[in-house]
Amino acid sequence: MPKIVDHDTRREEIAEALWRVVRRDGIRAASVRTIAAEAGWSAGAVRYYFPDQDGLLSFAMDLVSRRVTDRVSAIEPKGSVETIVLRYLDEVLPLDAERRAEFDVWLAFMAQARAESGAGALQEHLGKVHNELRQLCESLLHSLADAGVLRDGLDLRREVELLHALLDGLALHAAIQPDRTTPTRLRQLMRRHLESLMAENP
């Protein structure tokens, strides 16, 4: 029987090889030749799946966001609303090796997107994911408000912006100083922020 090839898996393997090259050597080193060598494939095989480098970069960037989305979608809403919200926030912070790798690659893609002139594919995807993270923040805060656990007088629109900025800032701090901004510290700071929004128990 002919061998069945899972083309989606092959594409993801190539994208993950690109991630490794980018993390080790920088995005400028991510050529078809270096990615093929990292994946253990021929350059022709890589070009079969990705005829041009822009398509490969876009796919690899999209894979980062899809991995995060898949983890968020798999969360079971069990426990208090505060616990559930923290569980969602955990999935968008670099708390383990997998999530740190994703964030490192994301930073490289972000820098590349900003360096592109005009509205390139990477810039467009960057904006899309940025908006999706903001929407997650909005959804989580509205869940807390609907549960009646937030203190009175909060401007939810402003709090969405603050939570979004806090997530971005904590992730960046963890990437720059991982020994100082540890996973434990990230969770502590995020929990402290949510506690500052909560109504006091009578």
Image (tube, rainbow, N blue to C red):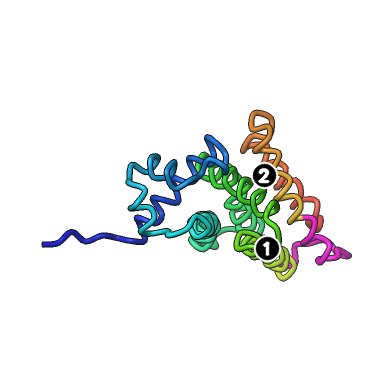
State the extent of the magenta-drawn residues as a range: 147-162
Relative horizontal placement of residue 160, taking residue 16 as reference (left or right): right
Residue 176 in the image: above or below residue 51: above
Q: Quadrant of the C terminus?
A: bottom right
- The stretch drawn in magenta includes residue 105: no
Residue 56: where, in percent of width, then height? 48, 56
In the rendering, which numbered label is found on residue 171? Answer: 2
Residue 40: where, in percent of width, then height? 33, 42
Q: Quadrant of residue 83?
A: bottom right
| Mark 1 or 2, closer to the camera | 1
Q: Secondary structure at mark 2?
A: helix
Q: Residue at x 18, y 59 (%)?
A: 3
- The stretch drawn in magenta includes residue 152: yes
Q: Secondary structure at mark 1?
A: helix
Q: Looking at numbered disc 1 in the image, what kind of residue is underneath it? A: Gly
To which residue does mark 1 refer? 127
Residue 4: where, in percent of width, then height? 21, 61
Q: Residue at x 71, y 39 (%)?
A: 173
Q: Looking at numbered disc 2 in the image, what kind of residue is underneath it? A: Ala
Q: Nearer the viewer, residue 202 or 159?
A: 159
Mark yes or no: residue 75 visible: no
